[in-house]
Image (tube, helix red, strand yellow):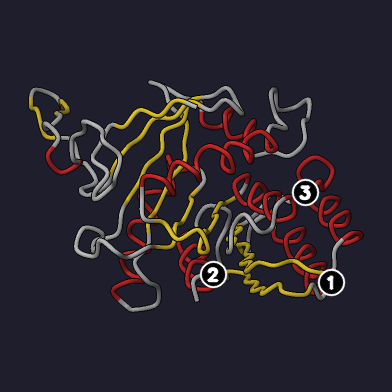
Amino acid sequence: MRVTAVLTALGCGAVVSLLSAGAAPAQTARTGADTFPVVTLPGTQLRHMHSAATGRDYDVQISPPADYARNPSARYPVLYVLDGQWDFKLMLSVQSGLVYDRFTPQIIIVGITWSGANPNYDSLRAMDLTPQATRQLPGSGAAPQFLTFLRTELIPFIEADYRADPQRRVLMGSSFGGLFTLYALFSDPGLFAGYVAASPAVSYAGRAAFAQETAYAAAHKQLPARLFLSVGELEQLAGPVKEFMDVLRGRNYGRLTLETRVISDERHAGNKPEAFNRGLRFVLR
């Protein structure tokens, strides 16, 4: 694994030469004849990682909590957000509101996405976030390798460089990200304490998620985790996800704390803000 630090790790013990996000030289963007500063996310950091497990390069977007430097002895829950190219900035806003309203504690947010000048996110996520290969999606089925990347490379890096609480890891994803979240839950339930699966693609590859859960249930009576599972009322996945909810409720797994929610009057993309808000509140309760 190769890690390149790009922005300052606030309060971290690693000895690296870095720039803070807020102090980085201003970039500019041109619109017509005028030049304006590029919008940045103050207080955030960017790390680059090459994974030996997947053979791919990742951008790791990190937001330490606002009080990180002021509380040098504190350890924080860590939220690992899949599809960080879209959902890291969403979770910065969601979490800020939850902290303000005193629903959740301060946390470290880690967004995971792919590196490169023009990454094809649709293709890359179809590789890393799917548990089985299909002919329709070249390179698909790399979820086992991506889970190894999280377990053996990314999580150890975060917990070595940041004051993370290993007992309060949370994994969050939507669509293929939600499918991977369920895959991780049934592959290694103790890796994370909480799982937020929004609109998981449970009908993918001949309902692979159902098959994995059935195999897990045949060998286990316990599922030690908190799981928030949701879907938009108006999306095509509503039927399969509600069926998956019914399956989980019927299992009566020991040590599973489950909350399900059908988000009214929303489709596949529009339900994410509420799903992530409700889900984070539930798993950090």
Mark 1 lies on a secondary structure that is: helix
Percent x, y for residue 269? 52, 52
Query: Farthest right residue?
Result: 218
* Inter-mark Cα distance, 1 to 2: 20 Å
Mark 3 lies on a secondary structure that is: loop
Looking at the image, which residue is at 62% across and 64% down?
230
Judge whether 234 appears above or below 18 on screen: below
Residue 186, quarter of the rendered image: bottom right
Residue picked out by circle 2: 283
Judge whether 223 appears above or below 127 on screen: below
Tell me: 95 left or right of 134: left
Disc 3 packing (10 Å; few <14; some 14–19; many ≥20):
some
Looking at the image, which residue is at 50% across and 40% down?
154
Residue picked out by circle 1: 251
Tell me: 186 left or right of 263: right
Name the amino acid type tagged 2. Val
* Inter-mark Cα distance, 3 to 1: 19 Å
Residue picked out by circle 3: 203
Residue in front for this viewpoint, 131 or 7: 7
Camera-near label (3 vs 1) is 1
Percent x, y for residue 221? 84, 69
**Of the residues under marks 2 and 3, which one precedes in the sequence?**
3
Looking at the image, which residue is at 66% across and 33% down?
145
Q: How many numbered tags mark residues here?
A: 3
